[in-house]
Amino acid sequence: MLELRQQLKLSQQLVMTPQLQQAIKLLQLSRLELVDTIAQEVEQNPVLEDETPVLTIAEAPPAAPAPDQAAPDVAADHTTDVKLDDSSISEINWEDYANEYEPISSYSPRNDSEDAPSRLDILTEKPNLISHLQGQLSYSDLGEEEEEVAFHVFGNMNREGFIEATDEELAEDTGCDIDLIRGVVDEIQSLDPAGVGAHNVQECLLLQLGRLGLGKALPAIIIRDYLPLLETKNFIAIAKKTRHGVSEVVGAVQVIVGLDPHPGWAYATEEPHYITPDVYLQKEDGEYVILLNDDGLPKLKINAYYRQILKNKESGSAKTKEYIQDKIRSAAWLIKSIQQRQRTIYRVMESILKFQYDFFEEGVSKLKPLVLRDVADDISMHESTISRVTSNKYVHTPQGTFELKYFFTSSISRKDGGDALSSESIKQRIRLLIGEENPDKPLSDKAIAQVFADDDIKLARRTVAKYREQLGILSSKYRKKPKLK
């Protein structure tokens, strides 16, 4: 039988208010993202003010007049009406404004001085690989259908300049004859840079050798028929199979090494990512000092005019005051959240300094295993808060600039039960071992694992291989010095 009943229940739950959501969001933002977020808030909230001093043109010190010029009259009106008559317009050399990437029908020859800046210097965006190829294609004799196919091929080209689809797939996608596809691909492969339009590295290198007139020479033979032997630097086997001397093979390899296996990278449009540290760690008088980097962060305050409106009972309607009160509350919470963010970063860095003191003194080899819970327990915060604080935050130290997450590494235990080692310190030691190895007998992953085992460090061979790959180091068979006799 169903019945309705009233019952009292006491429980606790976390309510994510908009203010709390904003504080969490600010905590995980990087420095550049924080500056952008603050700028948006200042733009949207009329109560907020940025009191960071800005030097305007009017405040800049005036330039000293030249000796042969009289000082201008300060009281004079400097506004001047500039009028151009037809004679002055006709004196402009409009040929200087020709566009190098326009079709040939609209192109005019230039007589630029060698010292004149290139028009590429005033472009807002650097031409990418596809734009570079399209500009060259406008000078070709391709028909309308062939140009459409070429643009489709460009759409299947990666940043290295390789076509990722086969000729058969391109023919199926475009509905064109395979011979037409191959003709367009051949036209693209004749463009600059040499090697662009290839389907793989092998074809790319062969195209570059063909451009150098070495399409049938020994370097091309090695790439076409003996690439696996070249990868392992087995020059003696290549010499036997090609019936050439080892010295000739070495000379051919030198030519191959000078080629570019990634021709499209020269036209990559990715901008460099500059890092501005959020924290500076400096050693002064034998002690480390933590300094928060506030440079570039707006200094916010609440506009006194709106405060005055709230205090004055006669100015403004109730609705207006309610709006202003809401904006002041939002501005105050933003300022408080930013201050709390900075304090939290300071406390986390202070805890990291405590745990990783030896690293800051001696370097990576002294980096200790550390997890988020260690720092969270140390400063009485939740692990999720520590994770947000350490993401996209950087510290400048005497050992270099590092992301805060860098100091949290897994541990490698010792057989004798001694202090565990950080995975980063293990990687550093692997790098040093390989750097000091005998090139005639490079260390295998198993041999490196044995070196650690001799020091009572438990490290599996597959773990060595994983760390070596993360360091970008080739396996021993590719590191071996080639035998020339």
Image: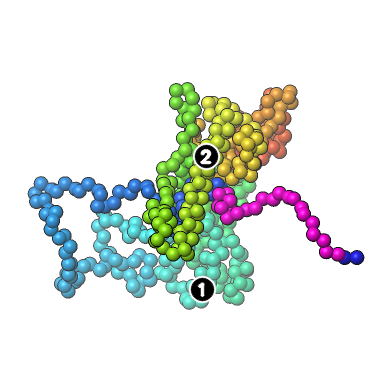
Rate crowding at label 1 as few (under 14), some (14 to 19) or many (20 or more) other CA atoms within 10 Å.
some
First of labels 1, 2 by sequence position: 1
Q: Which residue is at 49% across, 65% downward?
A: 188
Which quarter of the rendered picture does the N terminus lie within?
bottom right
| Residue under pointer 2 | 343
Q: Residue furthest right?
A: 1
In this picture, which residue range is highlighted in magenta?
3-24
Q: Nearer the viewer, residue 298 or 310?
A: 310
- Rendering coords of residue 279 (x, y %): 48, 38
SS under mark 2: helix
Could you say where residue 390 lies in the image, as x and y percent from the top left? 57, 42
Mark 1 highlights which residue?
Answer: 148
Report the predominant secondary structure element of the magenta stretch. Answer: loop
Give the camera-side residue of 53 and 209: 53
Task: Please tell me whether mark 1 or mark 2 is closer to you in this view.
Answer: 2
Query: In the figure, 173 relative to 307: above or below?
Result: below
Compared with residue 415, is residue 37 higher up or lower down, i.e. above or below? below
Give amino acid for label 2: Arg
Q: Where is residue 110 drawn, in percent x and y?
A: 27, 64
Residue 261 numbered mark, or none: none
x and y percentages locating residue 231 in the rendered image: 60, 44
In the figure, 68 relative to 453: above or below?
Answer: below
Taking the magenta stretch, the answer to whether it contains residue 420 is: no
Work out whether residue 304 can be spotted.
yes
Alpha carbon separation for disc pair 1 and 2: 58 Å
Foreground of the two, 40 or 367: 40
The quadrant in which residue 132 appears is bottom left
- Report if residue 15 lies within the magenta region: yes
